[in-house]
Amino acid sequence: MAGGVTLQLFSLLDDKRIMKTLTQDKVIISCAVTGSVHTPTMSPYLAITPDQIAEQAIAAAEAGAAILHLHARDPIDGRPTPDPAVFQGFVPRIKEATNAVINISTGGSTRMTLAERLAYPLRAKPEMCSLNMGSMNFSIHPAARRISEWKHAWEQPYIEGMEDLIFRNTFKDIKHILKVLGDDCGTRFEFECYDMGHLYNLAHFVDEGLVQGPLFIQSIFGILGGLGPDPENIVAMRTTADRLFGREGYRFSVLGAGRHQMPLVTMAAIMGGNVRVGLEDSLYIGKGKLATSCAEQVTKIRHILEALSLEVATPDEARAMLGLKGSGATAI
């Protein structure tokens, strides 16, 4: 952990109000295997084909990930795809080989319609799906400036085009997802909150009676368009969630984007939260060093947690903590 972040962390944890939130619960490790943001040019280790996604997901579960967060890619050129047939090429294999909770994205990408994003989740009826809690600017377009040669023609306009796109999830969109996946399929959600307002959006749905606990809140830091990777922002999100949902009403988790991944998820664990790693969130394992697999990141955070005398939750323990329906109740 970088020295400046460490000093800020200890200063923040010296606040007795923050210390009151610390728990001894086991830590759930989520792993986001491939995502829809990074492109093949950015790392040769990014899982693209169904075989690669399955292999990386299975290895991440063996390394200690209790939840596997999954997107699909076109196996020819690696572009994000909502095609259920592609998902079917790896999701059943992962279920057969592991006991991990399978978490299917409903975010897809900024270029997918709501119907496309829901096509496979509605077919699979998984235990868990991600659910972005609002519309937002979401971009990594500055990354295009650092790349002079691209492997595939689609990549450069895809990354540069993010500057003029939004990720759409209106209140009506979210309400629809809660109904067709939550109510009708028994799927529970990883509520992805990129900003403070997203917590209040979630509280609105709780107040409306459309969401019941225990909530699993994934707070996300370091994405352009959302909250920055400052440690103070983790504290602000945690204490705001405490006010809105009560300490016993939710499970808190943190996703740190890019180089901020390990410092921020370590801080989350120290504060009694859960953690998410994976090549969707960061392509690196250390400064300037590409991670060779998702399992490498899972192994690293597991070692950090164990060094802090924190226990890692098994998939079945995560199911109990999050009130999931069990893998046998899915259509995978």
Image: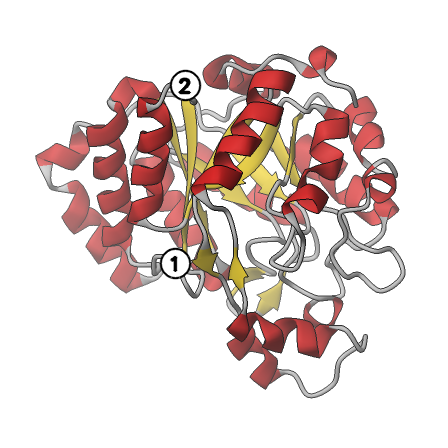
- Classify residue 29 as left or right of residue 87: left
Q: Which residue is mark 2?
A: 214
- Horizontal and vertical percent for residue 101? 64, 25
**Residue at point 38% right, 21% down?**
25
Q: Which three-letter amino acid code belongs to the residue tagged 2? A: Pro
Residue for point 61% across, 61% down = 283
Drawn side of residue 217 relative to residue 118, left or right: left
Q: Please name the amino acid that badge 1 sits on.
A: Gly
Q: Residue furthest left?
A: 16
Q: Residue at x 32, y 31 (%)?
A: 204
Secondary structure beneath label 1: loop
Return the disc, 2 or 1, that comes first in the chain's sequence: 2
Q: Which residue is mark 1?
A: 226
Residue appearing at x 44%, y 57% in the figure: 136
How many marks overall? 2
Determine which quarter of the picture holds residue 289.
bottom right
Q: Residues within 10 Å of mark 1 (few under 14, many from 20)?
A: some
Eyeballing the image, is 213 above or below 305? above
Indicate the position of residue 12 as horizontal and vertical percent values.
17, 47
Q: Position of residue 35 (x, y in %)?
A: 65, 52
Q: CA distance from mark 2 to mark 1?
A: 25 Å
Q: Is residue 140 above or below residue 313?
A: below
> Taking 140 as reference, is 181 above or below it?
above
